[in-house]
Amino acid sequence: MAQKKTIYIIDDDLMQNEIHTLILDKVYPDYQVKTFTRYQDALDHLTIDRPHLLFLDLNIPGEDVRTFLRQLKDMALDTDVYLISSRPYLADTSLLTECPAVKDFISKPLLEDKLRFAMGDPV
């Protein structure tokens, strides 16, 4: 049996993680969803899972998104990253150019149409 592709959600909001996981499980049942509340926890697993897609919350207290993105870039994984935030109007657009894996910003919550956009499916 082929191993499922993996999607990571890195967000300190446990309720958002649960909601996003439920939606992803419904829309993409062939993918395994893993959630993390800290950047380092996700980094520790990235080389094992090599996720297909990563949703990254910009505002995790005590965490530095730029450091995470630099480390991700150094790992040279083929993983698309979407930065997520409940306040996208405050997002630093320079992050889009600092790490080639970062594809776009998406505002929370991650509803089905936004997920399909990130996955490259027609909306």
Image (spheres, rainbow, N blue to C red):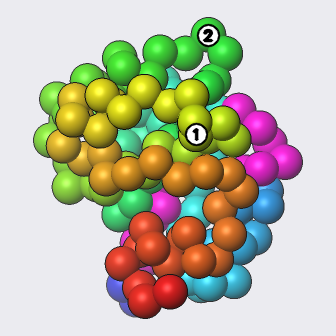
Q: Position of residue 24 (x, y in %)?
A: 63, 73
Image quadrant where residue 86 sits: top right
* Near-viewer residue (36 or 49): 36
Give the magenta range: 3-17
Mark 1 closeness class: few <14, some 14–19, many ≥20 residues within 10 Å: some
State how many labels appear. 2
Q: Which mark is residue 88?
A: 1
Q: Which mark is residue 97?
A: none
Q: Report the side of 15 relative to 81 (left or right).
A: right
Please say if 20 is above or below 62: below
Q: Which mark is residue 62?
A: 2
Q: Is residue 122 magenta?
A: no
The secondary structure type at the circle numbered 2 is loop
Q: Amino acid at mark 2?
A: Gly
Image quadrant where residue 67 sits: top left
Q: Is residue 12 magenta?
A: yes
Q: Amino acid at mark 1?
A: Pro
Q: Report the side of 95 relative to 7 (left or right).
A: left
Asked if marks 1 and 2 touch (Cβ < 8 Å), the reply is no
The secondary structure type at the circle numbered 1 is helix
Mark 2 closeness class: few <14, some 14–19, many ≥20 residues within 10 Å: few
* Near-viewer residue (96 or 28): 96
